[in-house]
Image (cartoon, grey):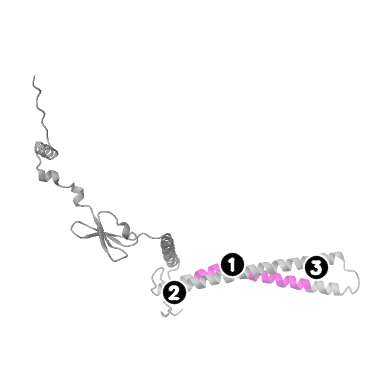
Amino acid sequence: MARPARMICRPGVAALAAALAGGLTPAAQAAPPAGAASAPIYSCVDANGRRLSSDRPIPECLSQEQRMLGRDGTVRRTVPPLLSPEQQAQRDAERKAQERAQAARNDAVRRDRLLLSRYPTLAAHDAARQRALEPVQKAIDTIRVRIARLETERLALINERSALGFKPVPEDLKLRTNGNDGSLEAQRTILRDQETERARLNQQFDIERQRLQLLLAGLPLGGQLDSATPTAPH
């Protein structure tokens, strides 16, 4: 009994048969995938001046700028060179410095806006200074009166002790003298504190008034005054 003959197909013939069976022409079967036509081309000039091209990042140009080109030759984007650890650290430091500077500018704008909202005129600022200083000045005046009274008492105690001559000083006189010394020291300390507070308030209002004056004269929020720019009169 004769065996049936086997059909032997060469690879090219098999591919053609499959294409025909699927309704595709050989040209369509040989076309590259759709994504391949849009794949970018990397182009660069290496350290030796050679222009190189590839379908992927070029190792010889990792330290150089590389351009990603479309198939039509247009530049899609530019790939910056890879940085050394030192260069990356420097770039990070520069970026952080820029961020700090921007945060400082934002804070300056916020402070200027708040200053203008609180004091729309210089007169309003001057009135606020007087209100802030009034209780401090009253306290200073009261303390000075107390100190003057204590100093008068101290003078009387000194005279009383001098009148004793070489006699022993009574315990009562010692207690009154020590109490006077302690009260005087306490009042003088309070006076120094209040005078320091008054100086602090005046300094704060002086700085604010100078800034407010510039803002009212047209300085932008957060702006810095050019040293050559004249200031408006008080």
Q: Residue 177 carries which label?
A: 3
Q: Residues within 10 Å of mark 3 (few under 14, many from 20)?
A: some
In this rendering, the label closer to the viewer, 2 or 3: 2
Q: Mark 2 points at which residue?
A: 213
What is the three-letter code of the residue carrying label 1? Pro
Residue shown at 13% from the left, 39% from the top: 15
Callout 1 secondary element: helix
Q: Residues within 10 Å of mark 1 (few under 14, many from 20)?
A: few
Magenta-colored span: 127-154
What is the three-letter code of the residue carrying label 2? Gln
State if disc 1 and disc 2 touch (CB < 8 Å).
Answer: no
Total marks drawn? 3
Residue 123 drawn at (x, y percent): 46, 73
Q: Residue furthest top?
A: 1
What is the three-letter code of the residue carrying label 3? Thr
Separation of marks 2 and 1 at Cα, in angstroms: 26 Å
Judging depth in this view, the residue of 201 and 20 nearest the camera is 20
State if disc 3 and disc 2 touch (CB < 8 Å).
Answer: no
Whether the magenta-drawn stretch holds residue 139 is answered as: yes
Q: Which corner quadrant of the image does residue 118 belong to?
A: bottom left
Residue 203 drawn at (x, y percent): 54, 72
Judging depth in this view, the residue of 143 and 213 nearest the camera is 213
Residue shown at 50% from the left, 68% from the top: 128
Q: Name the residue under label 1.
A: 135
